[in-house]
Amino acid sequence: MKKTILAGLLLVCLMLMLVITVSQAQTQPVFRIGVLDEERGPISSGARLAVSRINDAGGVRGADGTFFRLELIIQPSNIGATLDEAISTLEQASVIAVLGPETTEQALGNLPALQTLGVPILTPAIGDTVIASDSSELLFRTRAAERLQGAALGDYLTNDLAVTNLATVQLDSNSTASRVGFSLSLSQLPNAPEEETLPILEDTTELPNLVAQALEVNSQAVVAYGPPEIATAFYNQLRAGGYVGIFAYNQAENPVFRNGVSSEQLRGVLSTTTWPLASFDETSNDFLNAYVRAFGEVPGAVEAASYDAVQLLAAAIALPGDLKTNLEGLSEVQSVQGVLSPVNLARGEMSDRVSVIQLGALGGSEIKARYAGSQRLPDEIEVVEGTAPTPTPTLDGVFVTIKNAIQNVRTGPSLQYNILGQLRQGEQARVIGATIDFDWVVIEFRGQNGWLATYLLDVLGDRTSVPVITPPPTPTPGPATGTPTAEPSVDVIVVSAVPTTLTLGTQTNINVTVQNVGSIPAGQFSVAVTLPPDNYYTFAVVAGLAPGTQQTIVLPALLSSATGNFTAIIVADLNNDVPESPNGEANNDDFIFNYRVDRPVTLINNTTLAVSNQLDLEGNLTPVFDIQYTAAGLNTTGTCSGTVNCIGLMSPALNWDTSHYDAITSAAGINATLIPNTALTPGATIGILTAEGRRGVLRVDSINPGVSITLTYRVYQ
């Protein structure tokens, strides 16, 4: 009887403690932090981990002793396409600071809108002009700027590898700032190597010529900048041509590059990063293990910087005074990237930590040198009060990274098994088992075992530690289609959607193809989508689908608020009318529809202009000339007034296919009367306000500077 009473009292106490804890969590004051990133983007993930760990420890202690809980307000921007809308939403969210956006282009392209938020903005964008362009002094950079990374690489090449001559290669016009920053940093070294700057690659068909020039120079080192797919082709051709020197590439850790280069050639490639996965200090080790356990993925430099950003905000909140001033005055903060002291750095800079890394044959990296700004750090682990060196960590398990654009996850280890779903390039997962020969591995996928073929994967970790799992029975063909199936099921998915350009103010029919990839017939179901920027809802009903068959339905759309590039999810089986398996239900919203909304055009044409030739873009019976090609470049025929006779390069984020009517304004940079020949590279996209006030887009197809230029153009109604 006494035991029963004691047990009852204990249960009551536990319940009271639970009630008190929940009550405290509900009444604890909150600081909200905005995030400009996708839900599972690198900024969001790094910040989520930091916030959860801080809150689990009781929250952030303010200067007055009050404990605050941190809360993230994540606003996706469709990879920057709707960043202005996301910023506008955060204006109403009462946030104390904002993390993001991720890229230099996004930060600079939306700087006025970001400044209107009136709170500190912590971005991982590394472009050298980001902080200098901010007059509000609200912008903070959470990782080392590009110029510091260039300086670190130059120092290592010069002083560690004794390089006395090198060649720099620029593989596209967008990487000009990166290449120039490296060259400038190199020139400031006491014993600067002799630098040969090869011509900018303006057309990928000229890649063999660029390779030949690099081979002819035969320098000790080649330093390349540009898109990873072009860098991969350049590097492979360079090695195939017999080059045996040092190769450095600023995006060497990008999966496109690592997966496109053979193991024997991957070893030795140099790069820089603001946080290497190979870091072995205690803070990095703790972050890495916590991140892997939380997300089942391996973090990168942006995740680390975003984790640090939250920790820096927490440190600033604990100080008396305003948050911006406190951030600027922080000193000796132990972070994942190193010991950070913003008080000793230039305005807006939160970190100056850079590592030079060298890739191994399997794609992993080794730290070759560490820097704090221009200062070379010792090779041993950096220690601050009370911390001690720790050995190099061993990841707690084995992890795989998807190499191809998409890889199927199956119910068993062969193509005879059903497809559970797909993983995309760069996604990572923890291995929980494998076949005895390790040809297939098992991961946890949507609540069950999913099998992946290892020849399509990058594998990180000790394979011998993975248990062998007996494969499930080989499935038998389904009666209707011959498709392997473990048990009869129905699974409807969206296969495609066209067109991808919708006309503003005019109904456009989106032709959506749906398929039943299951083994039994599907009954009636609905397909629907909500389309930004109007949030226009449209749907259609499919009467039914036999196994393995497809049907194209029409979703009428009428968007009228703005032009631009947008993303939406087309949902199959909207109301769950079809009795699908859990895996079938999970892929109903997997189809991402990327589209452009634009005004109708009056004319699409192409032409070649010799020097002194003029062109009337509208093609009127009574011509009013709009542009003229001269020895200096492409001119308007009149003076730019802001609404007529204006020309300019479109934003780097836009090209011929993504440029749109609302982006062609004087405020967006279409405000000049001349574009010089140096900027008229093939593929360059130009906006124009014609002599009659119409808007148009021109694309440079080819150019013989000072002689002739070939253009394709469209003019809007």
Image: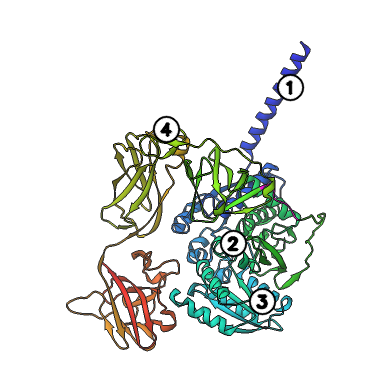
In this rendering, which labeled residue sits more in front, label 1 or label 3?
3
Helix, strand or loop for disc 3: helix
Left/right of residue 584 with respect to residue 160 in the rendered view: left
In this rendering, which labeled residue sits more in front, label 1 or label 4?
4
Residue at image coords 30%, 50%: 511
- Name the residue beneath numbered marker 1: 10
- Name the residue beneath numbered marker 4: 488
**Mark 4, other Cα within 10 Å: few <14 / some 14–19 / many ≥20:** few
Helix, strand or loop for disc 2: loop
- Name the residue beneath numbered marker 3: 154
Q: Residue furthest top?
A: 1
Q: Earlier in the sequence, mark 1 or mark 3?
A: 1
Rendered position, 643 above or below 335: below
Mark 4–mark 3 distance (CA, rounded to whole Å): 61 Å
Q: Earlier in the sequence, mark 2 or mark 1?
A: 1
Residue type marked 1? Leu
Q: Nearer the viewer, residue 654 or 669?
A: 654
Q: Answer whether residue 178 is visible to the viewer in this image.
A: no
Residue type marked 4? Pro
x, y (%) of residue 651? 43, 69
Is residue 146 covered in magenta? no
Q: Residue furthest left?
A: 621
Mark 2–mark 1 distance (CA, rounded to whole Å): 50 Å
Left/right of residue 260 with respect to residue 518 in the rendered view: right
Q: Which residues are magenta?
A: 392-397
- Name the residue beneath numbered marker 2: 124
